Amino acid sequence: MEQNNTPKKKRKLVFPIILALVLVGALIFTVKEYFYYQSHEVTDNAQVDADISPVVARVGGYVKEIRFKDNQLVHAGDTLVILDDRDYQVKLQQATAALTSTRQSVDVTENQVSEARTGIATAQANVEAAKVRVWKATQDYTRFENLYNDHAITKAQFDDAKAEKDAAEAALRVAETQIPAQNRRVSVNERQVGATASNLASRQADIDFAKLQLSYTVITAPADGIVSKRNIQLGQLVQAGQTLFAVVNDQGIYITANFKETQLEHLRIGEKVDVTADAFSDSTFQGTIESFSGATGAKFSLLPPDNATGNFVKVVQRVPIRIKIEADPAFIRRNLRPGMSVYVVVHTK
């Protein structure tokens, strides 16, 4: 009877032992998790982000060449699209012709100023010549007057001398009025030169603008990265302001982690971060907290919540945190793409 009771006693002891082991294991796991979360903050609400540069047409035109393929790696300054530039070449030629015409107009008005200044010298010379004739006519008049008083000449001869004197004085007055007239002519022509010359800057600006518009027909990559989301085809008419494609800057990839507001107490800039991408769960790379968003994600939404409406329901908000990736650039370019989900662990102590 005692031998039969021994197996039953052993079987009765198995369950308490298993239960005790489970409880001990659970206790160890709980303690371990407790101390782990005392020095770590984790979230799976995180994704890979990057600087994405949309390339927008600055002028309209037909697409003449496309020099890239979808998802191609390009470098800043590479020529990617060329638009038909014949319209802009014509506008540049028109602006150049207008500048040439304005310069010729300036030359003509400057020649007119030179002619007017020469006219001043001529008018002054005419005044001097008229003064000489007046002096000569006055001397002759005086002599003829004395001779006439002595009855040595006739009245007709005396009248001729007087008429010559009056004519010389009138010619002098006319010559003297030509000098102010020539001065006014010079002044008018000089103002005309200034007005015409002021158009030179405007015409040069038209040329610079035409050259700028012409340069916009060659569309280049704004940064190093991968070309994506192409929206154009050969021969397509694009409009100014139209988005043609986007360049994902492979040098600006980072992590955006959305932590709950209750997790922010121990988070600081510069704390180390472990990141695991869902696509590569067996590969963990490091990062550093770089900055905190200025507001919660809800505040930047299309319809931000307004708690003053009376329908208030408290919801734990999340704050975006930017994490700088500290990994091999080749690994980043090869494996990480904006939008990929990641798991983030922050070492707070």
Image: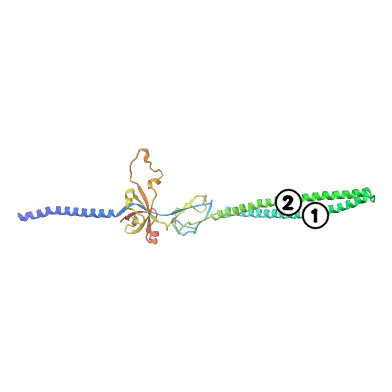
Residue 199, percent from left and from top: 63, 51
Residue 130, percent from left and from top: 82, 53
Q: Is residue 31 left or right of residue 279?
A: left
Q: Residue sitting at 39 percent across and 45 percent down?
A: 299
Mark 2 element type: helix
Disc 1 or disc 2, which is closer to the eye?
1
Q: Nearer the viewer, residue 20 or 242?
A: 20
Q: Residue sitting at 76 percent across and 55 percent down?
A: 121
| Mark 2 neighbour density, 10 Å: few (under 14) some (14–19) many (20 or more) | some
Q: Which amino acid type is marked by label 1?
A: Glu
Work out which quarter of the rendered image holds the N terminus and state it: bottom left
Work out which quarter of the rendered image holds the C terminus and state it: bottom left
Q: Is residue 137 left or right of residue 325?
A: right
Mark 1 sits on what residue? 128
- Residue 84 image label: none
Mark 1 element type: helix
Direction top: furthest residue: 310
Q: Nearer the viewer, residue 249 or 6?
A: 249
Q: Nearer the viewer, residue 223 or 266?
A: 266
Q: Residue sitting at 75 percent across and 50 percent down?
A: 180
| Mark 1 neighbour density, 10 Å: few (under 14) some (14–19) many (20 or more) | some
Direction right: furthest residue: 151
Residue 43, percent from left and from top: 32, 52
**Nearest to N terminus: mark 1 or mark 2:** 1
Mark 2 sits on what residue? 183
Residue 217, image quadrant: bottom right
Q: CA distance from mark 1 to mark 2?
A: 17 Å
Residue 94, percent from left and from top: 62, 53
Disc 1 to disc 2: CB gap under 8 Å: no
Q: Nearer the viewer, residue 112 or 48?
A: 112
Q: Which amino acid type is marked by label 2?
A: Asn
